């Protein structure tokens, strides 16, 4: 009886892996057996057996040999529209409904109606409201999405952190919300490199008639290939601070502060992670006045001190 249950469990695990393997190949294209084995945490031999099983099931998988070899599903293959359960469709509907709060895109409205019809009577008990992400001119977001879709070059002026303003001509890949702000991922034709541009720093945005002169991978693949700073490995700095009174709740609310230690005097040692090149977190810290003291690192403490001195100097002149 125990052997039967184990065999049944193994069969279910294999079924789930075959399904996941199919989706992975559809989403990532040609992939080597070793990469698949690493991703699914099985042996290369197991992947080969899984590929054979999928081929026998009618999935059109091509095998390529050589240095750049691997497995790939023919491009005209489509998954059955019943690939997800009602509950899974409910999660998709929730995500799309969250997208609707960001932009007034009629396409998102249409998709939401279709998905909710499938997931009817399913409730995951969650609502995503991203209306706070509406940043500046919503038309800019829609303009950039249109340029991405139609593969049109975008021209604009951009002011960087140093206050320098220059004109840029780029091939937009995607708009991305990260670290509390909207960015555009694009290929800078002059620099011949991928860059990210913060939307609030872009002005005089114009979609040109010029089409892309380069073929680009998906936005996620580009980000994966880009420097570590956009992968969150080195982009954030850990900051430790002492907070008093209401500042404890404010730092937790606005900067996602984590409580490290509660002191005898009622103050708290808290820890936050900040993006140094951004400025808004400085305003949050300064707004708490004497109720927040930076402990470490030293260069962040100096930055707060210098910002406070600049403010004091401004008012001392009056």
Image (tube, rainbow, N blue to C red):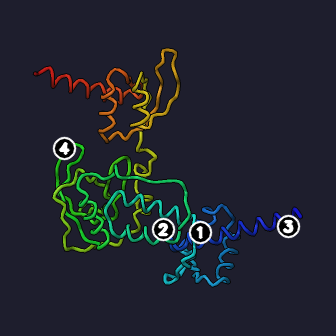
Q: Nearer the viewer, residue 89 or 50?
A: 89
Verify CB contact (< 8 Å) between mark 2 and mark 3: no
- The residue indicated by pointer 1 is 85
Residue at the limit of the structure toward the left, as seen here: 318
| Mark sitting on residue 4 | 3
Question: Rounded to the nearest whole Å, what is the CA distance between mark 2 and mark 3?
Answer: 39 Å
Local crowd size for mark 2, using a 10 Å CA cut-off: few (<14), some (14–19), many (≥20): some
Looking at the picture, how far across and down is residue 312, in whole percent? 20, 22
Q: Secondary structure at mark 2?
A: helix
**Foreground disc of the pair 2, 1:** 2
Residue at the limit of the structure toward the front, as seen here: 121
Looking at the picture, how far across and down is residue 117, in whole percent? 49, 71
First in sequence: mark 1 or mark 3?
Answer: 3
**Foreground disc of the pair 1, 3:** 1
Q: Nearer the viewer, residue 263 or 306?
A: 263
**Foreground disc of the pair 1, 4:** 1
Question: Rounded to the nearest whole Å, what is the CA distance between mark 4 and mark 3?
Answer: 69 Å
First in sequence: mark 2 or mark 4?
Answer: 2
Q: Nearer the viewer, residue 271 or 68?
A: 271
Residue at 21% x, 63% y: name it. 169
Verify CB contact (< 8 Å) between mark 2 and mark 1: no
First in sequence: mark 2 or mark 1?
Answer: 1
| Mark sitting on residue 246 | none
Local crowd size for mark 3, using a 10 Å CA cut-off: few (<14), some (14–19), many (≥20): few
**Above or below — where is 217 with respect to 54?**
above
Question: Rounded to the nearest whole Å, what is the CA distance between mark 1 and mark 3?
Answer: 27 Å
- The residue indicated by pointer 4 is 163
**Above or below — where is 250 with respect to 162?**
above
């Amino acid at each position: 009886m125990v052997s039967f249950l184990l065999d049944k469990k193994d069969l279910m695990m294999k079924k789930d892996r075959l399904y996941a393997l199919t989706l992975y190949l559809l989403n990532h294209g040609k992939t080597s057996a070793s990469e698949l084995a690493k991703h699914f945490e099985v042996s290369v031999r197991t992947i080969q057996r899984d590929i054979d099983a999928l081929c026998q099931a009618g999935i059109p998988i091509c095998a390529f040999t050589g240095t750049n070899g691997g497995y790939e599903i023919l491009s005209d293959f489509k998954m059955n529209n019943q690939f997800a359960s009602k509950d899974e469709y409910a999660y998709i509907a929730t995500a799309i409904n969250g997208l609707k709060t960001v932009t007034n895109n009629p396409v998102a409205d249409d998709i939401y109606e279709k998905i909710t019809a499938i997931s009817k009577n399913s409730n995951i008990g969650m609502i995503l409201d991203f209306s706070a992400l509406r940043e500046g001119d919503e038309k800019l977001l829609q303009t950039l999405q249109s340029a991405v879709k139609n593969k049109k070059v975008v021209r604009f002026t951009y002011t960087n952190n140093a206050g320098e303003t220059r004109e840029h001509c780029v091939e937009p890949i995607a708009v991305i919300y990260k670290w509390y702000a909207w960015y555009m991922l694009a290929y800078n034709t002059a620099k011949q490199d991928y860059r990210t541009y913060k939307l609030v720093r872009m002005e005089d945005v114009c979609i040109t008639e010029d089409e892309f002169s380069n073929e680009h991978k998906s936005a996620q693949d580009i980000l994966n290939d880009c420097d570590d700073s956009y992968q969150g490995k080195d982009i954030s700095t850990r900051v430790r601070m002492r907070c008093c009174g209401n500042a404890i709740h404010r730092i937790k609310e606005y900067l996602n502060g984590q409580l490290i230690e509660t002191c005898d005097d009622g103050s708290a040692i808290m820890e936050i992670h900040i993006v140094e090149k951004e400025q808004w977190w400085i305003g949050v810290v300064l707004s708490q006045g004497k109720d927040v003291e930076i402990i470490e690192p030293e260069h962040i403490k100096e930055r707060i001190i210098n910002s406070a001195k600049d403010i004091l100097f401004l008012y001392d002149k009056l």
